[in-house]
Image (cartoon, helix red, strand yellow):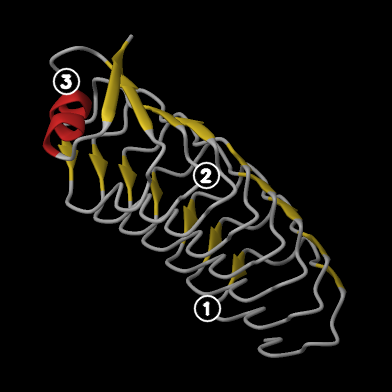
Amino acid sequence: AFFGCSMLTNVYIPDSVTLIGRNAFWKCAGLTEITIPASVTRIEGFAFGYCAALVSLPIPDSVSEIGVYAFTDCAALTRIDLPEGITELSDNIFYHCGSLSEVKIPNHVTRIGREAFSDCAGITSLTIPEGVAKIGHGAFCRCTGLASLTIPASVTEIERGVFWACRQLVLRGRAGSCAEACAQENKIKFEPI
């Protein structure tokens, strides 16, 4: 719809819209503010990728699905309010969002996709909610600022490379959990909770 409109700064989406399509605002480098109405139920892949000036993006709870690479390379994005209705964080959803520092994973999420937070150097601490079962390959790789990550006992699968280059990371979780096994295998400090 607005692919590559670098001069676009503000967008108000009317209540009649239910879907933000693939590449809708891809490379809208000047976009600083967008209002998403409660009528929207799905944000497709690549929708806001490379929106370099976007600092925050409130997403209504009506949204139940957010596609791959939806916010990739949003360099200025510091915080995002994810809707409670989503059940997974898609692959590469926040890939290379280096300024992202505030994110709360919704309680109904069961899967964190491949490289979901890869290269998010601004995240220093994160708690994964109970109910998440799988953390995909490279989900937190190169999160160089990540110092503390709490993983619930519900996580039964942590794929390879999830914490690659997270040099100051301390994993927190239950003794005997998948989190502890991952910490031992990858020589990461572990704190039982």
Q: Nearer the viewer, mark 1 or mark 2?
A: 2
**What is the crowding at mark 1: few (fewer than 14 residues within 10 Å), some, or many (at least 20)?**
many
Q: Is residue 19 above or below residue 9?
A: above
Q: Quadrant of the N terminus?
A: bottom right
Which tag, 3 or 2, sits closer to the chain's start?
Answer: 2
Q: Residue at x 60, y 48 (%)?
A: 122
Question: For the residues marked 3 and 2, what is the alpha-carbon distance in whole angstroms?
Answer: 24 Å
Which tag, 3 or 1, sits closer to the chain's start?
Answer: 1
Q: Amino acid at mark 2?
A: Gly
Q: Which residue in the rendered view is the most extreme toward the top? A: 193
Q: Nearer the viewer, residue 185 or 16?
A: 185
Q: Which circle marks residue 49 in the picture?
A: none
Q: Residue at x 21, y 31 (%)?
A: 183
Q: Is residue 51 above or below residue 192?
A: below
Relative image position of residue 157 (x, y in whole percent): 16, 39
Relative image position of residue 15 (x, y in whole percent): 78, 60
Quadrant assignment, res 124 = top right
Q: Amino acid at mark 3?
A: Ser
Residue occupied by mark 1: 22
Q: Amino acid at mark 1?
A: Arg
SS state under label 3 = loop
Q: Residue at x 59, y 44 (%)?
A: 82
Tag 3 and tag 1, C-beta contact below 8 Å: no
